[in-house]
Image (cartoon, helix red, strand yellow):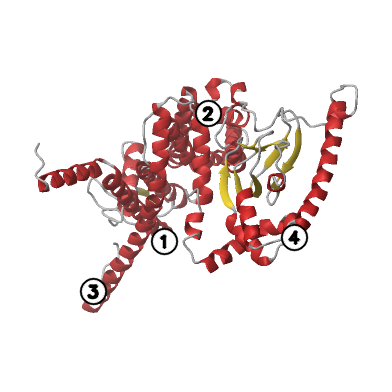
Amino acid sequence: GDVVPVSSNETLYAFIWMAIGVTINAAIIGNVANIVSNLETDSADFAGRVDEIKSFMFKHRLSSSLHSRVDDFSRYLWSMHQGSTVEDDFIMSLPYTLQTAVLEHTRAKHIRCCPFFDFCSKEVVKALSLCLKPRVYCKGDIICHYGDMGQEMFFLDHGTVEVISADLSTRFATLHDGSFFGETALFIKQPRASTVCALSFCDILELTKHDFLVELRRRQINLSCMMELFNSIHNSNIRRNKAVNENLEISKNQQTKLSKLVQKADDSMCYNNDDEKAKVFKPYSTFRLCWGICCCALSIYTCVAVPYWVAFAESNSDEYSLIMINVLIDMFFMIDLYLRCYEFTFPANTQYEKSQMAVDFISCFALLDVMSYRLSGMKHFRYLCLLRISRIPSFCDEVSQNLNFRGIRISLAINLLCKQGLFYLMTNHWVACVWFIIHRYLERSEKFTWATTDCPFGGDVGDYKCLAKYDPVIGEHNICNLGSMVECYVRSFHFALTTLSTVGYGDISPVTEIETIWENCVVLTGACFMAGLIGAFGAYLSENDSLGMNAFRLKIQSLKNYMSYRNIPD
């Protein structure tokens, strides 16, 4: 560093703290790397199963809409259930008392909320909650069909469903969390009276008629009170449905007021409206692949060019040309915002609207930078486009999914490693720009800065061979003493790289107080990035050992050893 011990006591003290620092630094890097590696390991098995399904769909040339639904389901399954479709595997491994205790807080509430089970004791409710089987339905799935002979009722734990008519033309009701439907199948043997369709991803608990009757007979429960209450509610539903059907018949007459009040199910999620959109806008089209690559590349360019322009712009002509390029890029992203809101079909469109549309909308205000020549206060709008750095991972994921659809597999470990490397390089670039911004704008009147003391071609401090030279006449140093700003950027990037990579200062070191503060921030950031890169490399090597060519070679070697042990001829 730039501070060294002098006496023996200072040297001993420094040695002790260097040993402690190495230990702490190794613990931090090891823990962060372990976290990153474990995150990848936890999802590796699930990603492998998803890849097998995608490989099967690609082999049999299944439709892009089915690919989209599988992607939707896999993302939902990972985010909500950590990749598991059957949570009973864990619950049933517990002792019976713990099973009932766990289900008492998770599933028994649905039994209690159903009026048919008000006469049941607490033990019966617990027993019935053990009979509930979890099911996951995708958006647009038909849960039960009109006319089917039902053998189960359903409790809606999470999600939204709609009850629609047999011809799918009229919506009767919309049910949300905590609702139940299909109860008639438990008490009366008759066809379903309507169709139930999932409007979103739904976690549903299913109670079959067989489990229901077996549990009640085992406990010798009198069903008369339960049947009496059911018949009362059922007869009320019959009268209501009869009135609804009569009103629907009347509503067919366009001259009546009911025709305007009845809500049709034309916009139901049970319909597949993807065909209404142009094929070019579908998720796995060639246009969407090229568009995603452009979005990713232009976002990276923006996050690289804007800091460089602030730190290293040489003249007004450079500023004008960059503004024109940025205007074209901003217009591209305004078109992108419109397409994503109104034209593109997404595997998870609502997710974009909630979490990403706001970033895209705010970053488009950077277009106001064109007014900076007339209103100087508008110049800061250009920095809003830097918000697009948060969209780079999602753009990369879109491209990766599109390539996977075409049979080009990009594993999670490689994806993670590429993202870590990309953001590491971008962070080096940003740090280099900030270093020069400090020298150029914040320390213009300082005689000694990191730039004025950096002499890559030899010479003394303050010489013309240094990065910058202080002029005592005007009381300021110049911006760059080298041939071009590119050479100054290379030196600044070298300074950032040596500190972010935890190598040390090297031949450039901070001089002023503000430079020292910024250097401390850079060193801490570099430690975190190095830990992340180590974890990403560990995840990649682990995946390569378990799923790649190394795993295949180990299997072949094990087979050869077995054949050699059993003396099997070649």
For the residue pair 84 and 243, the one nearer the viewer reads as 243
The kind of residue tagged 4 is Asp
Left or right of 186? Residue 78 is left
Calculate the distance from the C-alpha at mark 3 to the C-alpha at mark 2.
Answer: 68 Å
- Which quadrant would residue 170 be assigned to in this image? top right
The kind of residue tagged 3 is Thr
Task: Return the x and y of residue 130 as percentages of the image width and height.
Answer: 58, 58
Look at mark 4 in the image and give the residue it sits on. 118
Local crowd size for mark 3, using a 10 Å CA cut-off: few (<14), some (14–19), many (≥20): few
Residue 158 vertical position relative to residue 266 in the rendered view, above or below: below
**Residue 107 visible from this viewpoint:** no
Task: Return the x and y of residue 490 as percentages of the image width and height.
Answer: 32, 42
Among the two numbered marks 2 and 4 on one chain, the one whose residue lies closer to the N terminus: 2
- Which quadrant would residue 139 be assigned to in this image? top right
Q: Which mark is residue 513?
A: 1
For the residue pair 447 and 270, the one nearer the viewer reads as 270
Among the two numbered marks 1 and 2 on one chain, the one whose residue lies closer to the N terminus: 2
Look at mark 2 in the image and give the residue it sits on. 65
